[in-house]
Amino acid sequence: MTGELDFVDPDRPDPSAPLTPSGNLRRRLIVNRIAVGAATTAALAAVSVLGIVTYAVLHKGASQLSIGFLTKAPPRLPGPGGGMAPAIVGTATIVALATAIATPLGVLIALYMTEFARGSRSARFIRLVLDLMNGLPSIVIAVFVFGLLVVGHGQSGYAASVALAIIMLPLIARSSQEVLLLVPGQLREAADALGVRRWRTVLGVTLPSALGGILTGTLLAVARAAGETAPLLLMSSIFSPGVHSDVFGVGHGLDNIPLTIFTASEQADPYSQARAWGAAFVLLAFILATSVSARALLNRNRRRLSG
């Protein structure tokens, strides 16, 4: 009996022995350091590119910024002076109409996927379609809308807004879906326990709880749409001079900032090129401010819903 208790299996590791790294562990540590280094390098490269672009636009475009540059129309002939007021008004009008078109549709799609068809095949199919739409090049969407609304009718700010709305729709729908999924399920269960109908629960409980996140997704979509160029070149590049906001006028488009940057940068006049840099500075400042504000609002809303 004593011999059986004193028997020690020679293949069994000693639990009191110190741990020593094996060759496999050393290899994994090396691979981990390489992966971390590569990811850090890629992140620094992306930030560096943004920093270089921002510095170049700031360095060459900030000198053009003034009250007159933001409130005056560009000169009829090449030369100094003038501003980009028509482009600012046109861009604001086109993007505002696109937001008015895309936001209700995107929120309704997100509500259907999260509140009425969660986990169903239709919800998965719609999510796939939205992801595919989000990956479509803007020039493809521009050509489609051009053939649908411009051919036979002429250019218009409305056609440009429709193209931008198609670009904004998947962003708003997917971001709204993610925020709606963060709404605590206890709120829906409490409403069901009180006998509240589903549509009243959505309007009175779910939407108000996720309103901040929906607004955040809309702001991110606006920031992307404001910088799109291809739809505006095809559908809103012919317009009369001066400040206009007739977005539904058929046969003429609206001046806009991306088009101003494109046309002014192609001219040999140095004053026009300087105005292009100034317009680029205004557009970049708007996009950066909108994106940063949206990210901060999204983080705040997520903390509120998670808490």
Image (cartoon, helix red, strand yellow):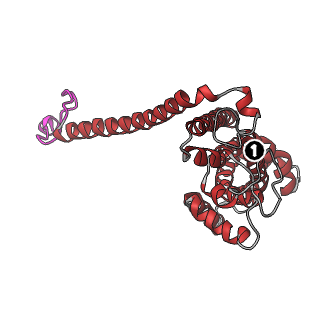
Note whether residue 124 is visible.
Answer: no
Range of residues picked out in magenta: 1-21
Note whether residue 89 is visible.
Answer: yes
Q: Is residue 245 above or below residue 249?
A: above
The residue shown at (21%, 30%) is 19
Q: From the viewer's perspective, tell me whether residue 82 is left or right of residue 32.
A: right
Q: Mark 1 sits on what residue? A: 92
Residue 152, percent from left and from top: 74, 74
Q: Secondary structure at mark 1?
A: helix
Residue 271, percent from left and from top: 59, 35
Of 275 and 75, the residue lying toward us: 75
Residue 250, percent from left and from top: 81, 63
Of 254 and 94, the residue lying toward us: 254
Of 158 and 4, the residue lying toward us: 158
The residue shown at (76%, 70%) is 153
**Amino acid at the residue labelled 1:** Ala
Give the quarter of the figure containing the C terminus.
top right
Give the quarter of the figure containing the N terminus.
top left
Residue 126, percent from left and from top: 64, 64
The residue shown at (44%, 38%) is 46
